[in-house]
Amino acid sequence: MHSSEGMGSDTLDAIYSRFADMYANSKAIRWEPELDAAIHAAGLDYQYVTRDWLASLDKAWVYREKDEPFRNAKYNSEYHRLLGG
């Protein structure tokens, strides 16, 4: 989705930590496996997940108000497939 440089980390734990730092407040956010599915649904390897890409995720999805993380139907379909749904 975004071609800017990665965040310098290639582990899911490090990416999830950045995700939580960006979005954590009083609302519940998505779990690590859900973020992992979104990353893979977008066709990204961990080293290519940027802060901009994380910021592009649908905020309603981040905060569990919506089931789809993307505006792209193909990515959303793949996301649900990866989660087993």
Image (spheres, grey):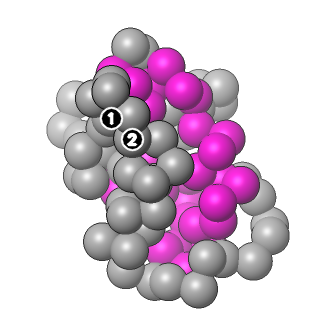
Image position of 37 (left or right of 57): left
Kind of residue sitting beneath label 2: Ala
50 in the magenta segment: yes
Kind of residue sitting beneath label 1: Ile
The answer to whether the residues at label 1 and label 2 have Cβ atoms under 8 Å apart is yes
Magenta residues span 36-64
**Residue at horizontal 66 percent and vertical 77 percent from the top:** 6
Q: Secondary structure at mark 1?
A: loop
Asked where in the image residue 65 lies, by quadrant, the reply is top left
Q: Position of residue 23 (x, y in %)?
A: 47, 41
- Which residue is labeled 1 in the image? 29
Viewer-proximal residue among 13 and 70: 13
Viewer-proximal residue among 20 and 78: 20
Report the disc number at residue 44. Answer: none
Image position of 43 (left or right of 17): right
Quadrant housing the C terminus: top left
Residue located farthest toward the top when viewing the structure as drawn: 65
**Residue at horizontal 38 percent and vertical 74 percent from the top:** 14
Q: Position of residue 32 (x, y in %)?
A: 26, 53
Viewer-proximal residue among 25 and 9: 25
Instruction: Give the main secondary structure, helix, strand or loop, of the magenta stretch.
Output: helix
Q: Residues within 10 Å of mark 1 (few under 14, many from 20)?
A: many
Looking at the image, is mark 1 or mark 2 nearer the viewer? 2
Query: Where is 61 relative to 30, above or below?
Result: above
Asked where in the image residue 12 lies, by quadrant, the reply is bottom left
**Residue at horizontal 65 percent and vertical 30 percent from the top:** 72
- Which residue is labeled 2 in the image? 24
**Residue at horizontal 65 percent and vertical 26 percent from the top:** 71
Disc with the residue nearer the chain's start (1 vs 2): 2
Q: Residues within 10 Å of mark 2 (few under 14, many from 20)?
A: some
Q: Secondary structure at mark 2?
A: loop
